[in-house]
Structure formats: C-alpha cells, structure tokens
C-alpha cells in the first residue's frame, strides 16, 4: 500500500459531513495554520513541500503563490478551479463529492496564506449536484467558526462562494475562468498580464486546482519537508489518478508517484489489469490533451528504463517518445480499440469546445475534425495524413491559450505512434468500417519479455 | 523640469529603433514602416484591448531583452507584446514566422467564401492583401464551407457572417464608441458568430464605424452595396460642419456623385477619427461637403490606379527619355517592312476597302497607288 494523504479517510462513513470529518482529525490543519503560523510561513511551507499544480501543467504551487502582487488597499482573491472538464479526468469530482470538507479546509488555509477574504469555487455546470454538497459543507464550516469574521481570533475574515459555470471546457483555463466569473463570455485573456498581477476584476488572483488546494491540508499537517519526502525528486507528495477505459477496476486512485506504470495498470491494488483478459494497446496517461502512448513506450521509456507514474518519468523522451502527467486522467485502450476513431472523438471534442477567439484554434480544430471523420469513415485520402500533421503543427504554439496545444497534441501523437493504422484506414476504406486494426505489431511488451 | 524618458532600443529584422517603454512590437515596427511591419487583421490601434486574436502578427523574439537575452520559446502576438530594452525581434527574417503566418492565412481562408468578385470590400480588403502576400495558390480544404444567411442590421448595415474572420473589432467599436452594445459574439468555436441575439437593428449614431473597422466584407454599407467597385471611385478628403462628429471624411466620388462616405483612413487602414451615421449615410450630395483635395492612397492599392498625381507615390515618373538621348532623334534599328514578305512595303492596307484578304497581297501592284511612308 502506498501512502495516502487525501483519500485516507474516504472510506469512513459520514465523512462528507462535518461531525465525522472533525472527529477524524479534520480542521486540525486550519488550527495549526492559524495558531502557529503566519501567511508567509504557510507559503514557505508549501514551497518546501514541492507541491506542484495538480490541474495539468504541474507548476510549483508555492512559487505561484509567491508571485501574487500585494498592492496596498486592493483585495486579493483565491479561486478554486473545479471546472474539471477534461475527458478522462474525474478526480476532483470524487474529492468534492465525498470529502468536501478537505477542499474547504485547504481553501481556508490557502486563503489565509494569500490574504484572500473572498474566495471562489468555480465549478463546472455539468456537476449539477456537487455545488449543493459544497454549499452544505461551507455552511457547516461557517456554523462551526471556521469561516466568516475573525476566524479563530486571528482577525482574518474569509468567505467562500460557489460559482457554477455553464458547461464550457475552456472555462477551465484560468483567464477564461476569471472572465466567466466576472460574468463575461469565457474567452481566455491574452497574457501578460498574468492573473497574479491582474486577475478577477483586475485584482491579484491565484487560480488553483481542487486537488492542489486539498493537498495543502496534508502539507500543513505533516509539514512541508515530510511531504516532500513522499514521492520521487520533483514529483513530491501523492497524486489522484482517475483511471478509466478498458481496465478491470476503473476509479480514482491515490498514488505516491513511486509506482511504475506497469504496476498501476496490472496490480490488483489499482487498475487490476486489462478488462476481459485482453492486451494493452495504448494509453493516455494524463487526460485527453496529453499525447497518447503505445504500450511499448508506456511501460518502458525509449531508453529501456521502467516508466513510473510521476511528472518526470511520464514526460521522459519529450513528446517524441513520452507524454505528460497532465491532470491524471488515465485512459487505457485495449487491443480492440481503434486509435483513429479515438483521435476523431477527441478532435470532435476540441472542435466543440474551442472558444472561437483565435483563428488557428477555431479553424484548425474544425479542419482536423473533418479530416479525421473522413479517415474514420473510409473516405480518407493518402495525403490526408500529412495534411493532418501539417494542420496540427500550425495550431500548436500559435494560439492564445493552451487549448490549441491540447487539441494538437493528441492528433500529433496518434499520427506519430500509429501512422500505419491511419494508413490502413485510408488504404482499406471498406474493411475499416467493419473491423479494427487491432494490436498489429504493437505487441504487449509483457508478452515480448515472456 | 521633466526628466527625459528612457527609450527602449528594439531591433526588428536588423533595424534598430528607439521607442517609448510600453510600445508594442507591432507599433515599434510601424514606426520603422515598410516590410518589417507585421500584418494585423484584428488589432486596431484606436480600439482598446483589440488584437491578439487573428495571430497573423506573430513574430519571433530572438532575444527577450538586454538584461535577459533568452529567446521566447513561442511565437508572440506582436500587437499585444510590449517591447523590452534590447529586444531582438524577427519578423520576415524568420522562417518560423513566415510558416506560421502562412498557416494562419490558410486557416482564415478555409471558411472564407473568397467571393471577392462580388464583394464590396474587394480592393480595400485586409484579408485580400494578406492572402496575396502570404497565402498559398490553392486551398487544401476540400469540405463544404461554413455559411450563414445575410442579416440587415437596420437600414444602413448589412452583416454577412460567412465572410467574417472573428476579429472582434466591431464588438469593441460598439463597446467603446457607442453607448450601448446590442451585438456580440454568440456560440463558440467554429460556429461562433457575430449577431444581435434576437434580430435587432443597430441604431446608434456611431455604429456605422463598424463598417470601417471590419477588415473583410462582413459588415457593409447598405447605401453603397453594389453601387460601384471601390477602384472606380475617387476618394477625396472632404469635411462638413457636423454637430456630432469631427465631420472629416473621405468621400468616394464618381464624377460629382458621392457614392459613399467613410472615415479618413491612415496608411495602416485605420480611421483617424470616428464619424457619425449622418455624415456616413445621409450626406450623399456633393454640395453637403467641402472638398479639400485628393485622398492619400497607398500607391500599391488598386484604388490608386491612374487616378491622381497626388502626394503618395502616385506621381508619374519624370520624363527622362529626351535627357538620355542627349538631343538625338530616336532611330529604328531596322525597318521590318522592307524585308517582310508577309506585309510588303508597297501595300497600303489603310487604302483597302474592307478587310484585307490574301488576294489583296497578290494583286498588290494593281492597288498600290500610294506607297507607305518610309521610316528613316
């Protein structure tokens, strides 16, 4: 069993409610933070912990917090990004639904550290039932003196508001989220200025993922240095992975970033192997926008080393032979899955979710979607694959926000690793409608070894 | 005494210029002018917050600043990136930039109808210029294009969304020039469109300016639609006393007829000052206007063809022929008539009644009553 810091109490009955949460050591981190530490010390502690943003980019949280501008007389804000819309990622939902007080506790500490008197939780519109759970938790916390005026006699006031989004993936991008929170159309802003300088209502703002803020609680509880010791190198602490796809046990798992990908997929403690005894074909290790990896590159890096479930190991080899930790949406594809269809599904998603502000993303996602649809339905041409490559290349890096990159990367990786499957689709327009390319030569590396 | 402001030194395509801190790369390049200026489809210097969307002005920053000379990893939108002291920018000298720009032009054109032959904007269209400069000769997009139906936004403005490139300029105009915005962007992604939510007329005294800022033919002047191609009209500077606006306009004339009125545009295609609807749409009589003189039009523009010998590059080249000949008469090297069997010198075709036939050449001696003049 690996170390569990976030979900260690998830099994306790009634943990969703204040009484059970408090009885099991809840809100001790707030007590510790407010009574023994000042805001600077908390930021310092988070810096020491090496906690990295769990939303996808993996930016060190402590450093992000230290960037926030502190002009006199202007309020600062903390926003919790609960707009978890990435296909394959559902870790925040689990956290908010079952242990909402952990997030509230993390928010109180973080608000104190950043000096945010009004803190927002921006939650995606599709999570229709969760705002009620969160508001219930906020109500309980306020009733017990953890929120409101003069928390624990520290002189610090804090209120938390839950704001529902309207179901746009793009509002998970921090500046689009800020625009949406302000009541405007959720279009990403052009950076700079960064939110740390001018965020919501032009006030200094920090936007953090749900899991990041929840992870502040164990950081304060066990101390930054102890937290940094869990995990490997710069991948400190534990990470929630939402595993789905063709595995025996889909679900949310907390890992301590020292286990290998192979162990994560095949051990009974985690995914429990590929469903129905099939073989592994490919996997997207960090949510839909990160590059897909074929089985041979997933379990071993290009250098032949074992690949581990952490930020560094997953991105080993760059985009040529590696991927990214991303947001932790672990999607497993077995031998019967069609990579072309899968890529088409993702392209369709990004086309639908592009905000339409900047031209490469607006037109490029549409174009990729149309080409992929043709290839998938047996109408593709041989030149389409190169064209697709060219289109994604010209989207990547040329857009305002990372959605363009997120749309381009899965397509690029699919062509890079599964080009022969695309070619097979183009060359066998009839056959591709009735059967899949299958595993082909991407033999399961476990079999090759055996 | 005011302290002299420290100027930032920025190098664009090898040309160094000193600009005030806070200037964007695009504006620094515009101060240099010419080739180094990146094209801009959505940026409009008179509109706050505009720019950053079309991505045609992407440039490469080879060195961030003198203090931190690291290059920026991504191409940056020059219209929204401010210069740093010692910044080195590559625009047309960077292959990456040219490739990305070509990509952006291709993206902009995949859903653009390219109906220039029937588009009122043709001849003064930013997208047309851009695709001439950076576009490919053929499209690789072989799908049906996105189309919308045309909407009349009130009596003066027609919106043809099919041509729109989503620069957001008209939205900013409505926000910043008029007191109430009734149109905006609906939907998102590739189906985003400029619209009034439930069909409404745009009736504001200054809303006509959306036509001037539109880089393509999406918003057109209904009082001018299909009246004339812009290059058949002559732009003149004109003004009138207007209680609402500055009254300084370009009047586009055919003879003495005022076909259309627009704001005065500078060399970057941006209006110098906003004009009101009354000046733009209602004053179509030459007597309403005091004509100042010909408007300055870029000599590369199709509009400037042979119209004026005005100030901007439209002067005819100086007569140099007599100078280089040094008083000598021009001399033909050879009189081809004397050697040509096809058109013999003895035959005066002008004297023939009707068209010449082969028989005329055979019978030449009989008709030849007046020899064609010899050229010395």
Image (cartoon, rainbow, N blue to C red):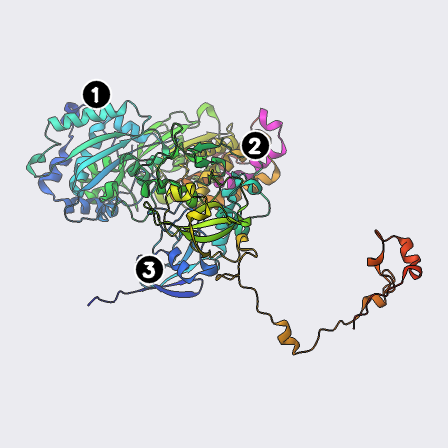
Q: Secondary structure at mark 1?
A: loop
Nearer to us: label 1 or label 2 = 2
Occupied quadrant, residue A214: top left
Nearer to us: label 3 or label 1 = 3
Q: Nearer the viewer, residue A85 or A2?
A: A85
Mark linked to residue A13: 1
Q: Nearer the viewer, residue A46 or B359?
A: B359
Q: Which residue is mark 3?
A: B84
Please state the horizontal and vertical placement of residue B291, each as a whole percent of the image: 44, 54
Please give left or right for residue B104 compared with residue A190 in the image: right
- The C terminus of chain B sits in image quarter: bottom right
Judge whether A195 appears above or below A157 on screen: below
Q: What stretch of residues is rendered in magenta?
A: A412-434
Q: Which residue is mark 2?
A: A374
Is residue A432 within the magenta segment? yes
Q: CA distance from mark 1 to mark 2?
A: 51 Å
Please state the horizontal and vertical placement of residue A449, each as a whole percent of the image: 49, 37
Please give left or right for residue B321 compared with residue B175 in the image: right
Mark linked to residue A391: none
């Amino acid at each position: 069993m690996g170390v569990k810091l976030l979900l260690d109490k998830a099994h306790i009955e009634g943990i969703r409610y204040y009484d059970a949460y408090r009885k099991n050591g809840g809100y001790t981190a707030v007590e510790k933070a407010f009574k023994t530490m000042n805001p600077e010390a908390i930021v310092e502690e988070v810096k020491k912990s090496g906690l990295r943003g769990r939303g996808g980019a993996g930016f060190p949280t402590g450093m992000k917090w230290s960037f926030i501008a502190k002009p006199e007389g202007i309020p600062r804000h903390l926003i919790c990004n609960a707009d978890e819309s990435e296909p394959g990622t559902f870790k925040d939902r689990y956290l908010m639904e079952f242990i909402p007080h952990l997030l509230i506790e993390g928010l109180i500490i973080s608000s104190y550290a950043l000096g945010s008197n009004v803190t927002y939780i921006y939650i995606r519109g599709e999570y229709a039932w969760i705002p009620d759970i969160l508001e219930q938790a906020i109500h309980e916390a306020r009733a017990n003196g953890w929120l409101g005026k003069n928390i624990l006699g520290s002189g610090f006031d804090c209120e938390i508001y839950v704001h529902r989004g309207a179901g746009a993936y793009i509002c998970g991008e921090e500046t689009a989220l800020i625009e949406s929170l302000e009541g405007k159309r959720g279009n990403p802003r052009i950076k700079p200025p960064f939110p740390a300088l001018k965020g919501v209502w032009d006030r200094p703002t920090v936007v953090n993922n749900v899991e990041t803020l929840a992870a502040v609680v164990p950081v304060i509880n066990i101390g930054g240095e102890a937290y940094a010791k869990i995990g490997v190198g710069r991948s400190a602490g534990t990470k929630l992975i939402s595993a789905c796809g063709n595995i025996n046990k889909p679900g949310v798992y907390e890992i301590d970033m020292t286990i290998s990908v192979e162990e994560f997929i095949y051990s009974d403690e985690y995914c429990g192997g590929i469903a129905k005894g099939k073989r592994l074909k490919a996997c997207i290790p960090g949510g839909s926008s990160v590059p897909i990896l074929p089985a041979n590159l997933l379990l071993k890096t290009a250098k032949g080393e074992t690949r581990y479930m952490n930020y560094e190991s997953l991105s080993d080899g760059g985009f040529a032979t590696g991927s990214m930790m991303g947001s932790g949406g672990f999607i497993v594809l077995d031998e019967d899955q069609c990579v072309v269809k899968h890529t088409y599904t993702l392209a369709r998603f990004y086309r639908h979710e592009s905000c339409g502000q900047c031209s490469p993303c607006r037109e490029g996602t549409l174009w990729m979607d149309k080409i992929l649809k043709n290839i998938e339905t047996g109408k593709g041409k041989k030149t389409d694959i190169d064209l697709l490559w060219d289109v994604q290349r010209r989207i990547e890096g040329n857009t305002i926000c990372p959605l363009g990159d997120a749309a381009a990367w899965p397509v690029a990786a699919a062509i890079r690793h599964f080009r022969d499957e695309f070619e097979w689709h183009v060359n066998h327009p009839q056959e591709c409608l009735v059967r899949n390319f299958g595993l082909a030569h991407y033999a399961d590396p476990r079999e090759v070894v055996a | 005494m005011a302290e002299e402001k420290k100027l930032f030194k920025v190098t664009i395509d090898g040309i160094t210029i000193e600009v005030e801190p806070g200037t964007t790369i695009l504006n620094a390049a515009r101060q240099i002018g010419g080739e180094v200026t990146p094209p801009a489809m959505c940026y409009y210097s008179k509109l706050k917050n505009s720019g950053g969307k079309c991505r045609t002005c992407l440039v490469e920053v080879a060195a961030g600043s003198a203090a931190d000379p690291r290059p920026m990893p991504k191409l940056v939108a020059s219209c929204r990136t401010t210069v740093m002291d010692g910044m080195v920018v590559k625009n047309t000298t960077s292959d990456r930039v040219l490739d990305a720009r070509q990509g952006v032009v291709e993206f902009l054109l995949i859903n653009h109808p390219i109906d220039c032959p029937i588009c009122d904007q043709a001849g003064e269209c930013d997208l047309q210029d851009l695709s001439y400069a950076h576009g490919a000769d053929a499209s690789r997009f072989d799908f049906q294009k996105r189309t919308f139906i045309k909407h009349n936004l009130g009596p003066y403005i027609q919106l043809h969304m099919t041509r729109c490139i989503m620069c957001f300029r008209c939205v900013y105009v409505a926000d910043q020039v008029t007191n109430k915005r009734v149109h905006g962007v609906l939907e998102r992604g590739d189906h985003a469109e400029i619209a009034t939510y439930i069909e409404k007329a745009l009736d504001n005294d200054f809303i006509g300016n959306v036509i001037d800022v539109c880089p393509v033919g999406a918003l057109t002047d209904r009082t001018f639609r299909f009246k004339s191609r812009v290059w058949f009209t002559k732009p003149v500077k004109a003004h009138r006393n207007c209680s609402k606006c500055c009254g300084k306009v370009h009047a586009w004339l055919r003879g003495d007829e005022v076909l259309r009125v627009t704001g005065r545009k500078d060399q970057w295609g941006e209006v110098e000052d906003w004009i009101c609807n009354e000046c733009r749409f209602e004053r179509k009589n030459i007597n309403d206007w005091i004509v100042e003189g010909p408007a300055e039009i870029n000599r590369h523009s199709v509009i400037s063809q042979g119209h004026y010998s005005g100030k901007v590059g439209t002067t005819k080249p100086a007569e140099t022929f007599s100078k280089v000949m040094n008083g000598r008469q021009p001399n033909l090297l050879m009189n081809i008539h004397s050697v040509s069997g096809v058109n013999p010198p003895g035959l005066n075709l002008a004297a023939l009644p009707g068209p010449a036939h082969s028989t005329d050449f055979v019978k030449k001696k009989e008709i030849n009553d007046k020899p064609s003049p010899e050229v010395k």
